[in-house]
Image: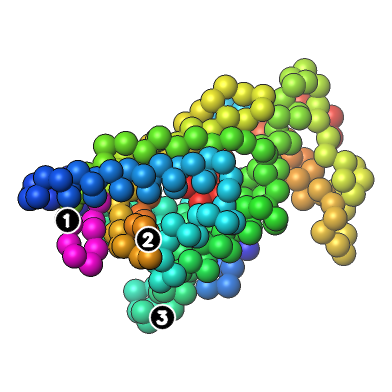
């Protein structure tokens, strides 16, 4: 899975090849566009496998639904306090690398970089 | 063939076509009731034959013949997998869904198989929000008589939009 800052993800999960593109629609919403692809010379069996495994991804994806749902719930928690910052504190407040995934360092690092790139006047 | 090009089945023996229409209406009502009532386990797979196809696709993919579906089940077993995922493994905001299945048309009434279509509107209600539309679209069905009732051999749900509100959890 490869993220291209700030809004594209190119991914291979088993035999599904897909691109996710986020189109922001203001502070409260974004579109998530999914593009699945295969190769012209894929065998019919491989093509069928890609179609089956696409069940894992997308708006009804067996492994991707939780992500969208949890993001929506997080947004609901954050947006009721529009005048303050929300900090995701799982795994601390730093953006340092860890040897495990039980951390939101990736989200914190994204916004730290985003603030820099956008030139926002904001405490880090 | 595109949906728009399909004609209704010619009206032959009036009584039996009316009965068939009524049976399909009952099948759709049962389908909606099971899904809206979340009575998935004991019921939804009963409405399909074992060797079935159930797909949910955006209309763009349907019209262009693009094969990717947001839900793709090639058997009753795969539908059961979807139900178990919705019940046990997916973490999602609780919601109530409501199906409105209307405008049933019988496209072909063969001895072995009936082809039919219906419009569908699905709305959902979260605990803290106004009711919103999940999707508007149509079903394209292949229906067979199996045991004491009609069952789906194939149910294709084509939805009109390119976007869905966050996610589809259970079969629709």
- Other-residue count near label 3 (Cα within 10 Å), few / some / many at <14 / 14–19 / ≥20: few
Give the number of the mark in front: 3 or 2.
2
- Tell me if residue B23 comes above or below residue A63 in the rendering: above
Q: How many marks?
A: 3
Mark 3 chain: A
Q: What residue lies at 51% left-to-right and 28% top-to-bottom? A: B132
Which is nearer the eye, A100 or B21? B21
Q: How is the image coloured?
A: rainbow
Measuring from the top left, give residue B15's x and y in whole percent: 15, 45
- In the rendered structure, the answer to whether residue B143 lies left or right of residue B133 reads left
Residue A47 magenta = no
- In the rendered structure, the answer to whether residue A84 lies left or right of residue B147 reads right
Measuring from the top left, give residue B135's x and y in whole percent: 43, 38
Which is nearer the eye, B40 or B124? B40
SS class, disc 2: loop
Mark 1 chain: B
**What is the magenta range?**
B109-116
Q: Find the distance from the CA under tag 1 to the CA under tag 3.
A: 32 Å
- In the rendered structure, the answer to whether residue A85 lies left or right of residue A33 reads right
Give the number of the mark in front: 1 or 2.
2
- Circle on res. B108: 1
Q: What residue lies at 74% left-to-right and 40% top-to-bottom? A: A111
Q: Which residue bears the numbered disc 2?
A: B148
Which is nearer the eye, B29 or B121? B29
Q: Which residue bears the numbered disc 3?
A: A45
């Amino acid at each position: 899975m490869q993220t291209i800052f700030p809004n594209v993800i190119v991914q291979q999960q088993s035999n599904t090849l897909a691109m996710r593109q986020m189109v922001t629609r203001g502070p409260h919403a974004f579109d998530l566009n999914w593009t699945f692809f295969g190769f012209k010379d894929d065998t019919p069996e491989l093509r069928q496998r890609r179609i089956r495994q696409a069940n894992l991804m997308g708006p009804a994806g067996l492994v991707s639904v939780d992500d969208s749902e949890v993001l929506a719930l997080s947004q609901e928690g954050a947006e009721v306090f529009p005048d303050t910052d929300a900090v995701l504190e799982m795994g601390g407040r730093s953006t340092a690398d860890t040897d495990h995934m039980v951390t939101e360092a990736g989200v914190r690092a994204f916004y730290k970089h985003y603030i820099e790139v956008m030139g926002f006047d904001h405490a880090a | 063939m595109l949906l728009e090009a399909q004609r209704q089945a010619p009206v032959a023996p009036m009584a039996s076509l009316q009965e068939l229409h009524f049976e399909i209406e009952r099948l759709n009502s049962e389908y909606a009731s099971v899904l809206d009532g979340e009575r998935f386990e004991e019921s939804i797979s009963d409405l399909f034959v074992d060797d079935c196809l159930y797909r949910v696709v955006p209309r763009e993919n349907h019209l262009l013949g693009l094969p990717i579906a947001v839900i793709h089940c090639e058997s009753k077993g795969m539908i059961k997998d979807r139900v178990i995922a919705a019940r046990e493994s997916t973490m999602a905001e609780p919601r109530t869904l409501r199906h409105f299945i209307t405008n049933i048309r019988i496209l072909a009434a063969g001895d072995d198989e009936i082809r039919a279509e219906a419009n569908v509107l699905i709305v959902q209600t979260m605990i803290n929000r106004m009711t919103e539309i999940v999707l508007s679209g149509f079903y394209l069905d292949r229906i067979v008589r199996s045991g004491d009732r009609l069952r789906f051999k194939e149910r294709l749900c084509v939805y009109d939009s390119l976007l869905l509100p966050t996610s589809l959890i259970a079969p629709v």
